[in-house]
Image (spheres, grey):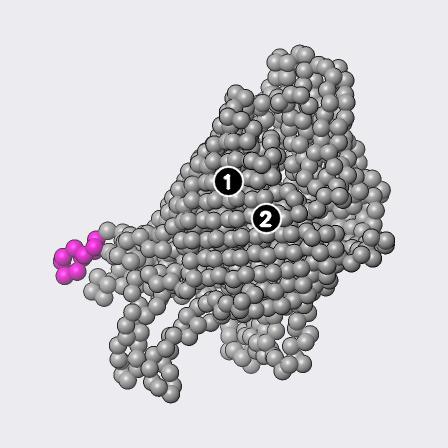
């Protein structure tokens, strides 16, 4: 820490040595109507190549030689503002931007819609505004973040009713999902039909698919970084919507006008109120709550307290109840040490719990994961050509694999607690963004991570350190018996891991419309989601790396060509990537993960790889806007054997999984095509459509059968060698904004949508059975949705 402070003091003194005649103008850029900070607003010194952009809290810093300048402040969806200044010394200039009501809602799917962004080295980044998310047609008319990002290149999911999302051939648990910097472990409501993110409360969303900056860590595939609105500091506002299955309401306003504000948003489904009228006893419901308080006592300090609480409940005739939910709280302090040094201190608590109530058996099952997270991030604007980010992060985890308790007096279940696990993840990082020449820019950094697995009440050790045994006679893997059960406490250390995680991105632009970019990153992931399904479920269990589970280590290379043309009306992005992942676990045949005390007995370590080509062509301006996204990719995994064993004195090679050969991951999609378009006919009518086509995901079908004691028993071939049918659908929506909205404070709109217009019965799964009448085997397709019409009423005042 002493060295860290000395480095900070040294850097703080550099400007006096390097630029005696340069001065810095800095400030905060906010919206004029509610003083909401504007992220990514550009600040340009007209007639020069000098400029900058506001950070995630709206702060900017620009260093210029002494002189007279015209500064241009601009951001998508806002009117540009010019301000003339005489720069004779350091000065602060806060700027408020007015929303451009004459412009239609912009479609923004990438940060590089501005000139400054095509010059920046950051690549593999996509962004979506709340207005865009609300325009995209989705099932049951509910605007949804996760359903929207799967329209972007390199992003897919497991299909209808599947939780999570997959990025560049990675698993769903390899995505770091942040809401106001707090980790979200389950991002879905109703088993994947909706996300936990209320679009009314979202201000900014960024998805990092590659070239991930060093300030992020802990996941090997992507980072989805979402910030909530801060609340209107000037006026009291209400907006919401009433839909077919759920409604939402968001209230925001000043606590002390111009200095502090609050935001309170809620969302709830109500289909459970009507299902009993149809004699349907199965009920699925959810609700969530978004809160935020912002306080700015002076120009140099801002305080934020934000929270999220969500809950899902699924019941089957009151005899089976499944529930799960997230609870997160975050206290943040933004402090401006000087016009060049900005800091953010965050203290975060996150809890994800999930469980079951089985009345017909007489017990309840509860499990979960919670963490305390301390983050301190600093950004130093050394010059316009050199920006330095650095900081530290410490997360303490508590894992509860499960507790079973009787829920009635006549239950035969004995109260039992699976052994809890504890771990700590610490990291420090430094990240630099530097303009080497007027045509070449770099972003490079290093993250050092340290993971400690603490002691627990008891843990198992095995002969030869092999918790999984291979039976050479039967050719199968089996669970090993523990050689000993050892007791310990949290003061002991079971295992530690350390990793250096370098990152680098570069861009070379030979003019203001064309650029070539490349990136490399090495990332470590110390947490694993224990699931042998194609997509996460609420009953999946998170477990830390430890004595028998190594951290996942990933290397990803990417290169791309970016171009803007037609006076920036159109843009083209192409990227090729190659990614490898070491220590990717997979499960032995017949593995049972439910209530598993010693999970290491059913897993083997392997490796994974993914590679592909992404293309994004978009139209950004005019009455018609939209994009075409296409991804050609391959995602594979290999789990080889661990060596040889003896059978009757002769060596036998372990087969691993699939005889040690590469096999498709469950989320491999060879072709993934998305087309989105929106047309604003006039102020009253807005039309939107999207079309999706995906190669069917890998699965397992029986390749034969045999008779055993009069029963027909199927047997399966190699893992994931079959595929479901290809997936495709077309969605349409129409938004009606009545003319009477122009003359009153209450603003309302009707959204009419049709999901899956041509009623495609996309297969969620295909099962095989014997027909009871004919006695022949048959395949049965299970589809979640056919055509689904819906209507939603949105309002604000």
Quarter of the image with the C terminus in it: bottom right
| Disc 1 element | strand
Front residue of 192/124: it is 124
Tell me where residue 245 appears, x and y as whole percent. Answer: 66, 67
Q: Residue at x 52, y 21 (%)?
A: 436
Q: Main secondary structure of the magenta part?
A: strand
Q: Residue at x 63, y 52 (%)?
A: 678
Provide the residue designation for mark 1. 573
Tell me where residue 583 appears, x and y as whole percent. Answer: 38, 48
* Residue 686, above or below 616: below
Question: Is 179 positioned to the left or the right of 695 in the image?
Answer: right
Provide the residue designation for mark 2. 626
Q: Residue furthest bottom?
A: 773
Q: Magenta stretch containing residue 475, yes or no? A: no
| Disc 2 element | strand
Front residue of 206/84: it is 84
N-terminal label among 1 and 2: 1
* Residue 269, above or below 70: below
Q: Is residue 492 visible?
A: no
Q: Magenta stretch containing residue 651, yes or no? A: yes
């Amino acid at each position: 820490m002493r060295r860290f402070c000395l480095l900070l003091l040294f850097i703080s003194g550099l400007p006096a040595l390097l630029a005696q005649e340069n001065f810095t103008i800095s400030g905060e850029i906010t919206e004029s109507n509610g003083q909401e900070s504007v992220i990514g607003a550009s600040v340009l010194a007209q007639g020069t190549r000098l400029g900058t952009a506001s950070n995630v809290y709206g702060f900017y810093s620009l260093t210029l030689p002494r002189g007279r300048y015209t500064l241009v402040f601009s951001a998508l969806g806002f009117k540009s503002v010019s301000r003339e200044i005489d720069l004779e010394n350091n000065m602060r200039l806060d700027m408020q931007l007015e929303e451009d009501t004459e412009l239609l809602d912009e479609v923004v799917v990438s940060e590089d819609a501005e000139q400054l962004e095509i010059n920046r080295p950051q690549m593999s980044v996509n962004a979506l505004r709340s207005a865009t998310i609300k325009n995209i047609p989705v099932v049951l008319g509910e605007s949804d973040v996760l359903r929207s990002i799967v329209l972007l290149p390199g992003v897919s999911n497991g299909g209808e009713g599947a939780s999570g999302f997959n990025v560049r051939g990675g698993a769903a648990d390899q995505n770091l999902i942040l809401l106001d910097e707090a980790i979200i472990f389950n991002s879905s409501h109703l088993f994947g039909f909706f996300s936990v993110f209320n679009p009314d409360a979202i201000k900014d969303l960024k998805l990092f698919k590659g070239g991930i900056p060093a300030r992020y860590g802990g996941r090997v595939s992507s980072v989805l970084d979402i910030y909530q609105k801060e609340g209107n500091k000037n006026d009291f506002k209400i907006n919401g919507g009433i839909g077919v299955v759920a409604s939402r309401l968001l209230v925001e306003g000043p606590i002390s006008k111009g200095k502090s504000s609050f935001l309170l948003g809620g969302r709830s489904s109500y289909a459970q109120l009507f299902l009993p009228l149809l004699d349907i006893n199965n009920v699925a419901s959810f609700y969530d709550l978004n809160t935020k308080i912002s306080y700015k006592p002076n120009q140099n300090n801002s305080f934020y307290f934000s929270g999220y609480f969500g809950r899902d409940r699924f019941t089957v005739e009151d005899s089976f109840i499944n529930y799960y939910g997230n609870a997160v709280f975050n206290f943040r302090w933004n402090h401006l040490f000087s016009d060049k040094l900005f800091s953010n201190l965050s203290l975060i608590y996150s809890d994800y719990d999930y469980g079951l109530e089985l009345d017909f058996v007489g017990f309840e099952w509860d499990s979960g994961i919670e963490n305390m997270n301390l983050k301190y991030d600093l950004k130093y604007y050394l010059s316009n050509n050199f920006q330095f980010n650095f900081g530290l992060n410490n997360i303490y985890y508590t894992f509860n694999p499960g507790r079973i308790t009787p829920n009635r007096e006549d239950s035969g279940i004995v109260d039992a607690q699976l052994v809890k696990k504890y771990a700590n993840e610490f990291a420090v990082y430094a990240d630099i963004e530097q303009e080497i020449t007027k045509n070449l820019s770099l972003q490079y950094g290093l993250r050092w991570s340290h993971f400690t697995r603490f002691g627990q009440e008891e843990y198992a050790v095995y002969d030869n350190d092999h918790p999984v045994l291979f039976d050479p006679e039967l050719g199968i893997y089996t669970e090993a018996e523990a050689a000993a059960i050892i007791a310990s406490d949290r003061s002991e250390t079971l295992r530690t891991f350390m990793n250096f995680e370098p990152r680098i991105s570069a861009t070379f632009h030979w003019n203001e419309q064309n650029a070539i970019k490349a990136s490399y990153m090495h990332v470590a992931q110390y947490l694993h989601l224990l699931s042998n399904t194609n997509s996460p479920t609420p009953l999946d269990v998170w477990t830390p790396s430890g004595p028998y589970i190594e951290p996942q280590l990933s290397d990803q290379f990417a290169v791309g060509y970016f171009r803007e043309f037609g006076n920036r009306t159109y843009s083209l992005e192409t990227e090729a990537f190659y990614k490898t992942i070491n220590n990717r676990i997979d499960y032995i045949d017949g593995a049972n993960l439910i209530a598993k005390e010693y999970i290491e007995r059913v897993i083997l370590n392997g490796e994974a790889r993914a590679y592909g080509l992404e293309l994004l062509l978009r139209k950004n301006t005019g009455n018609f806007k939209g994009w075409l996204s296409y991804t050609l990719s391959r995602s594979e995994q290999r789990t080889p054997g661990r060596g040889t064993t003896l059978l009757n004195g002769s060596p036998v090679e372990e087969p691993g999984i699939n005889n040690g050969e590469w096999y498709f991951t469950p989320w491999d999609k060879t072709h993934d095509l998305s087309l989105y378009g929106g047309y604003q006919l006039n102020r009253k009518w807005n039309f939107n459509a999207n079309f999706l086509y995906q190669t069917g995901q890998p699965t397992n079908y029986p390749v034969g059968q045999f008779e055993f004691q009069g029963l027909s028993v199927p047997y399966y071939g190699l893992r994931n060698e079959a595929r479901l049918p290809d997936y495709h659908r077309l969605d349409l929506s129409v938004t009606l904004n009545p003319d009477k909205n122009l003359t009153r404070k209450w603003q309302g709109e009707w959204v009419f949508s049709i999901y899956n217009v041509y009623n495609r019965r996309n297969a969620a799964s295909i099962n095989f059975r014997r027909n009871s009448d004919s006695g022949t085997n048959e395949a049965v397709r299970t589809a979640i949705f056919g055509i689904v019409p819906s209507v939603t009423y949105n309002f604000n005042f």
